Amino acid sequence: MNEPLWLNECELVGTVVTLRPLRASDAQGLMAAASDGRLWELWFTGVPSPASIEQYLASALSEQSQGRALPFVVVDNASGNVIGSTRFCNATPQHRRVEIGYTWYAQRFQRSAVNTECKYLLLGHAFEHLSAIAVEFRTHWHNRASREAIARLGAKQDGVLRNHQIESEGGFRDTVVFSILESEWPVVKKGLAFERVRRQFATADREPGG
């Protein structure tokens, strides 16, 4: 008899965004989001391009079917449009550990309330519903913006995996690993809740008529 999946499909609803399960039919919405800034041209990220979107979706959904991942699309609540993607990945249910990764947003939603709220929703689900004992974040050594954003969440750097991966063009990727522990979540949650509200007001102030 098969063991029940640890990562079950769910919808995480916030004030600014909703995270809903990724579907193969999301290809067009994801491409529209990634086209804002032509994000696939950033060499240190894994954002899908028009040429790779089908493989991107197939890989994400295959990982989900095997219980190792739970991919989401990020939906802007105001417009209903897909503005990016994120996922739980590299799950090890027997150790109650999971990573949050494959995160990207359309350029116009970067440095806004979106990322803070996404992490608030995902971390809350991991610690409060999945009973995770640790949540990991990994990013490319050269992606300084990502490293700084992860540190601002309250995650601590565990170390650097040197020559961790061979990239498509043959170079070597150094991966920086961060984590938040179960015991650290209450304090991290308070910080994220404050930052979530602060960024929502800051975003509203920048909008015409706001």
Image: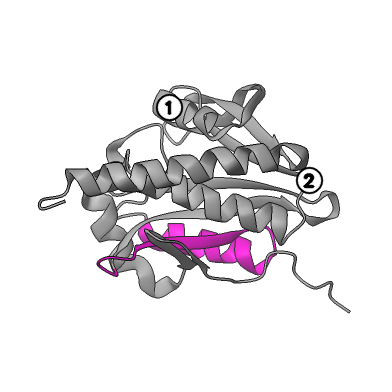
What amino acid is at disc 2? Answer: Ile
Q: Is residue 93 left or right of residue 48?
A: right
Viewer-closest of 154 and 201: 201
**Left or right position of 73 against 71:** left
Residue 47 appears anywhere in the view = no
Total numbered circles: 2
The residues colored magenta run 53-80
Which residue occupies 18% across, 43% down?
Answer: 206
* Residue 13, percent from left and from top: 48, 66
Q: Residue 39: give x, y in percent of width and height.
A: 29, 43
Where does the image place residue 18, in percent across and percent down from the top left? 43, 64
Identify the secondary structure beneath mark 2: loop
Q: Determine which of the numbered discs, if any, sits on residue 133 in the image.
A: 2
Q: Residues within 10 Å of mark 1 (few under 14, many from 20)?
A: some
Say what amino acid the circle numbered 1 marks. Answer: Asn
Per the rendering, the mark at residue 143 is 1
- Along the polypeptide, which appears first: circle 1 or circle 2? 2
